[in-house]
Image (spheres, coloured by chain):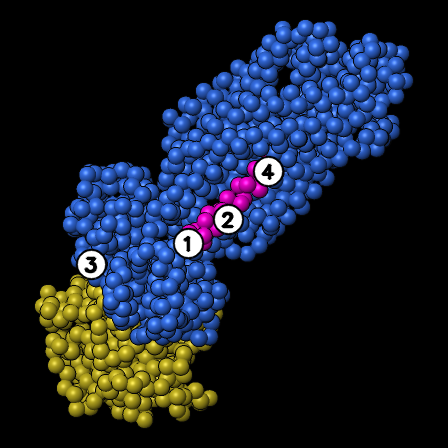
Amino acid sequence: MNVRLVIAGMIICLPHMGSAQGFAGLGTQAEGFAIPDRNTTLEFPSDHGAHPDFRIEWWYLTANLNGSDGREYGVQWTLFRTALDPGDDAGWSSPQIWLGHAGLTTADAIYFDERWARGGIGQAGVSIQPFTAWIDNWAMASPDQTLQNLTVTASGEYFAYDLAMTARGPLVRHGDNGYSVKSASGQASHYYSQPRYVVTGTLTLADGSVAVTGQGWLDREWSSQPLAEDQSGWDWFSLSFDSGSKLMGFILRSDSEDSSGDYSSGTWIDADGSATPLAPGTFQAVPLDYSIVAGRSVPVKWQVNLPEHAVSVIIQPINQQSWMGTSVPYWEGPVTISGSHTGRGYLEMTGYE
Amino acid sequence: MRGAAFGALLSHWSRHPLQLLTLVAGLALATGLWSAVQAINGEARASYARASAQLGLTGMDMLIPKNGNISVARYVELRRAGWKLAPVLEGRWLLRNGSVKLIGIDPLNHPALPAISPTGSPQLDALRSPGRIFLHPSTESQLDGHPDLPPVILTETLPTGIVLSDISLAESILGLHGQITRLIILPDQPMGLKPLADLAPELLRRAAIDTQTGRLTDSFHLNLTAFGLLSFAVGLFIVQGTVGLGIEQRRNLFRTLRAMGVSLRLLTGLLLGELMFIALVAGCLGLILGYLVAGALLPDVSATLNGLYGETVEGGITLRLSWILSGLGMAIFGTLIASAQAFANFYRMPLLLAPGVQARSLDARSSQQVMAIVGCGLIVTGSLAILLIDGLVGGFALLAGVMLGSALLLPLLLSAILAAGARTARSALSEWIWADMRAQLPGISLAMMALLLALATNIGVGTMTSSFRLTFVGWMNQRLSAEIYATVKDEQQTGEFTGWLADRDITTLPIRWAEIPYDGSPIRIYGVVDHDTYRENWPILQAQPAAWDRVFDGGGAMINEQLARRQNLWPGNILTLSQDWQIPVTGVYSDYGNPHGQVMISLPALLQQVSHVPNRQFGLRLPPKDAADLMKEIRQSFDSASISLIDQADIKARSLAVFDRTFVVTGALNLLTLGVAGFAILTSLLTLWTMRLPQLAPIWALGVSRRQLAWLEVLRSLALASLTAVLALPLGLVLAWVLLSVINVEAFGWKLPMYVFPMDWLRLLGLALIAATAAAAVPAIKLARIKPADLLKVFAHER
């Protein structure tokens, strides 16, 4: 087992939802880390920055884009942080480890790259004066301390992108004012989003550059708590309806044969930006069709229902093979929405062996 | 018909088994020595490649600084410019019993390492305090008795002699905070990057294996290859002799076969087939021999490489298909070359004409001249090569040109000397002897050329090693001036120990050094305190006035010869260790047996630049007669496990033992070459023996007894061998000079004074004469015992 794989596992198996129990022996609660607290009030700009006393954290951007060539694109930019021990040190002995993932999806291809860095030497990190999250030459940067205007850049062997984003709405605090519960037994994270960016920019591929416009969604989340032992993976949806309202929903899948042990939750966001947490179990997502992706069976067509907002939609990816073949691989890609509502969004699925 | 003809050809060998044995043995020897050298080189390269692969570096390029280290800030700048690089910090870790190479890496970015990422147990702990050190089980003993080690993880997947750790641990062990030795350029770089040459002009791009050590060991392997080639060439002289003999003796048979209707073409084909078959068999024997020789020499080669370059060659000789094929190829190719002349003669041979030795010798005269002209050309070309081509290749071109050229000149020289000798002849018999020697010359000159090369190589290499040894011993006596060398367990003990010594009025010279990279390889910087030991004893080659005073004032540096020659830095030049660390060079000292550059500055100057310099080694000055008592007293007063002591005599003996081991291989190859040359003379004389009967028979008929003829035979052989030996002497000295002043400088970075050893020459002359006598003995005994009837037969029927 590779060091990088283990650390990637620590982070990737937690995104949006915490950690898959038992993976690489990391399921148990690590000593000394801070624990998310319901009474914590998020404060900005400081909470845009890193929380080194928590075990895991990420700055996670996804964008649905239209190219001047008439094609649809999806872009992912993620900076993960994981701590081997709480706190930070200068130099190589820093326990903070940073991992960058960049992805670019078209209807028939997916490009991705991965970057690693140790904290403490300046190769990666997050500053808030002004806000910049970076690893190597990849950066998400603001001219000020807010997340209002961001430029996002990344490049890999076969792709590069350079995007400018402007927020068209307020930050959204998930769960109880940013305290997002992840399991029936009470594990939780601090979680907020900026789901409403307008994006313009340029994608560069092997055959040249293409100008793009579209919409982006930024998630910020940190935690230290692993999940319950019986959870094997999750499906996470960020959906932007053409009506202007948005839906974030997730299902944590249990190991059990039926879906009785699954835990689902989410947030409904009105067109004006006001957010309502969803009661556990109200967000429903059922796989309709599977496809073989990277040698494993992965759901590629979903029925998503949220009765309280009369949502009954079909979710289908732009590219069924949106596989991020990184140290720990997962499915991540742009999707289209049809049914009671129309629109676009992003889907992340982990734990499909 | 074809089968019968082939059988008739082969029957020759069953009637002359000794000849067959000679041919096979000559070819097997030539192939064997060549293959042995190839196997050793192949094994060493495979060992380097294995080490490189175990460190995950196969096919990777490196960035190394022109001088100094790379700062972590610079690394981050390059990463932030988009370049995927992996940092490596390397240095010597000073331990109680010497030091080991410590390599610090960033496991997050380093190419996949089996050592740090074994299946099953993720080595996350390597990244967190107190870290982990990874090493091969055979390296573990070097850490014995070292206090406060981080947890050790043993793994078979690392090269021996290397300790691996996370870079954070390595920088604190080595005291090199914020520094990086080199950067590995990882595969799959992102698009649109600025070239590294623009971003980091101060860094050089190199292939991972083309490190300083790689280049140095290359020169060693080139040396070995040259030796192998020389042995091969000498071996081929034997083949040349026996193939010529085999054809000469079968003239009657050829005539008969031709008369029976075998075409010249078929006959040539059959002869060639026979020869190729013999070459294959002999080649196989040679490979077995080469395998055994290589296996026997490998430990010594490994010791040599370790002694000279600090590189280890692991494992035994493995059989590689490429090695087998190249060995057999050399055997066949060599046989073809060596027998080309014999075949040409055979093809041109008149069917019925009797062989006229005189005609052959006249023919030979013109070929002697051609050879002499080619020889002169080769010597000139070699001399030009050293002027035009830099480095080791130029040196070897000079060697090859001078050696081969002189060998080609030999027949003409010998012939001229014999012609001059003939003029001194006073009796008919002595006139005949001189004339007969000249007549024999074409047949034996190749063997003499082999002898010349072998003797010259022996003189040259012998002079080189002996000069080196003499210089080394003198240097060691100067350099190892302290009576006792001590290493203490840790720095807490340092104060206690030095205080104890001060109470007894014993001068303590701290031996403190830091290692920093310079032009891609590590150099050691010693910080020394003001003491006359240095002024009086240090082996200085060149120095400014008051050089040591300037060093102790902090305004100068002494550097070793290797560094001076490599960087062309001499007294008066400025040594730039990093951008803000520049020191004028005040002197250059000799420093044999060390592959790396070395600098001596004052201790305060060193401590000002390098934060953590271990202080655990000392040289103690005291009256030599008190040394043994003091050592006993120290052992009684301190825990004997915590202080290691070695006295001057012991360290000298150990150094000399390492030195001698280093040249074991050279000595062995030397002796083998001489043996092969002796064998070549034997085969030549055997060849001549049958051809000479028609000439000896008349002399016998005129009244010279067979016994007398036999003695004359031995004398002739001795005379020719002595002449050759005398001619080999100047050639050997030229060879020694080239080795000492050209090859050594290129290969090791030091120039050595040349000393001559006439007793060694006498010994060699003796050896050459013994070889010549032994070689002449067989034909001489045959001659003494030949039946008069056989001599009479010469008159009865001309062949």
- Give how far apart the Cα atoms at labels 4 and 1 are: 31 Å
Q: Is residue A109 above or below residue B367?
A: below
Q: Residues within 10 Å of mark 3 (few under 14, many from 20)?
A: some
Q: Which chain is blue?
A: B
Q: Amino acid at mark 2?
A: Arg
What residue is shown with label 1? B649
| Numbered badge on residue B607 | 3
Q: Earlier in the sequence, mark 2 or mark 3?
A: 3
- Give how far apart the Cα atoms at labels 3 and 4 are: 51 Å
Q: Amino acid at mark 4?
A: Leu
Please name the residue shown 19% across and 85% down the image.
A178
The magenta segment: B652-673
Q: Residues within 10 Å of mark 1 (few under 14, many from 20)?
A: few
Indicate the quadrant where residue B102 lies. Answer: bottom left
Q: Position of residue B732 (x, y in %)?
A: 50, 28
The quadrant of the rendering that contains the N terminus of chain B is top right
Q: Amino acid at mark 3?
A: Leu
Quick check: do tags 3 and 4 share a chain? yes
- Inspect the magenta stretch and tell me whether residue B664 lies in it: yes
What residue is shown with label 4? B671
